[in-house]
Image: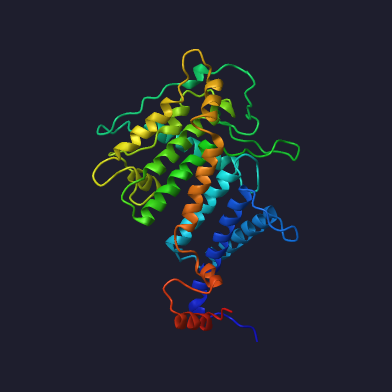
Amino acid sequence: MPVTADPESQLEIDEWILDYLVFSAIKAVMEDHDGFQTPVDRISPDTRTTLLLQMVDSNLTMFRAMHSDHHCSPDLQFRLRLLKFALMFTRRNTSAETTAPFAALHKLRKSRRACARLFRSRDEASPGLHLPDLSKHCVPDDGIWIKREQVTQDTDIVEPERSLLQPPPPVISLMDTLPHFMTLSAAHKNMAEETTITNVWMMLAAGYMAHAAMEQYLLYGSERPDVLREAFAWGYESDCRAEDGSDEWLVNAMFCGEDEAVPEWDKTRDQHWRILLPPSGIDLRQHFENLMATDLPLIKFEENVMGFLGGLLHGSLPPVLVQVETGKIEGLSKDEMRAFRRQFRVE
């Protein structure tokens, strides 16, 4: 006779399984990005990651269908958000099954640019953000590696239907991932109930913005005058009209201390956009290459972001089933652990 779960426990078990898969997928994505190698007689990292992502997708679909009225635990919701960002960041340079469709990216970019234009435009209590147009410092051609055929950054044209012989779907830029980095950071700060953002995070976030801006000019050949504003228009707005508890509201609150905006943030952010301004006589490409060789090395930036993600993944209690694998669940005595195994038939 097949063993089935107690109906009252089914929801809890289903959520545990989904949480376990999401946690495992995040680890696999990060290990895949870092070049983690499994023994030769085992499944390759890339195949393992793909299988885990497929399992997450199918289990999440099934979970939502079976428990449509249930809201997942805050930890699981956060891990789902973390998985989404980890995928966007680590696979942004190539088109993949996990790449967002053109329409979604187009909507994201349009929304972000609108928010950047309005940043502090109605806020008399906070200093405005007046940023220069760096495109005038660009030198045409000059060996810049432009990927306009893959990323449509400067147009509102809707992507037409493609045949199998046409180019692949667009890849994701750092600028596309920046809003997700901010909402992920804000969600973590809210869950951890931290009082203010740290200096380490501020340096990471400002560096993220700088790299996102440099990439737009160097890699995608952007000629838009508002690239800096789109990248750096992040901070506290006392006149924020976002709905309480929304992502936009959480991001705005993240930049506020106990009673006012975090003063160190505006200073750190402004230092980073100012170093992007090329000295007289040096074109933009050369200046950015100098920066990436000295003050803003790309490899160090990647390492810092991956370290940040690793801290988010391992900075809280792991899923219940991950704890079960270790033989101990946080808060349970040995007797309670044995009773748990009997109740849920865990070997």
Instruction: Give the residue displayed 31% in from the left and 41% down from the top.
Output: 240
Instruction: Give the residue displayed 35% in from the left and 28% down from the top.
Output: 129
Left or right of residue 37: residue 252: left
The correct choice, above or below, for 156 with respect to 314 in the image is above
The residue lying furthest to the bottom in this view is: 1
The correct choice, above or below, for 272 with respect to 337 in the image is above
Q: Quadrant of residue 113?
A: top left
In this rendered view, identify the residue nearer to me: 49 or 183.
49
Q: Quadrant of residue 332?
A: bottom left
Where residue 325 sits: x, y (%)?
Answer: 56, 71
Tell me if residue 145 can be seen. Answer: yes
The correct choice, above or below, for 193 with respect to 277 in the image is below
In this rendered view, identify the residue nearer to me: 302 or 192.
302
Q: Quadrant of the N terminus?
A: bottom right
The correct choice, above or below, for 286 with respect to 311 in the image is above
Instruction: Give the residue displayed 45% in from the left and 28% down from the top.
Output: 228
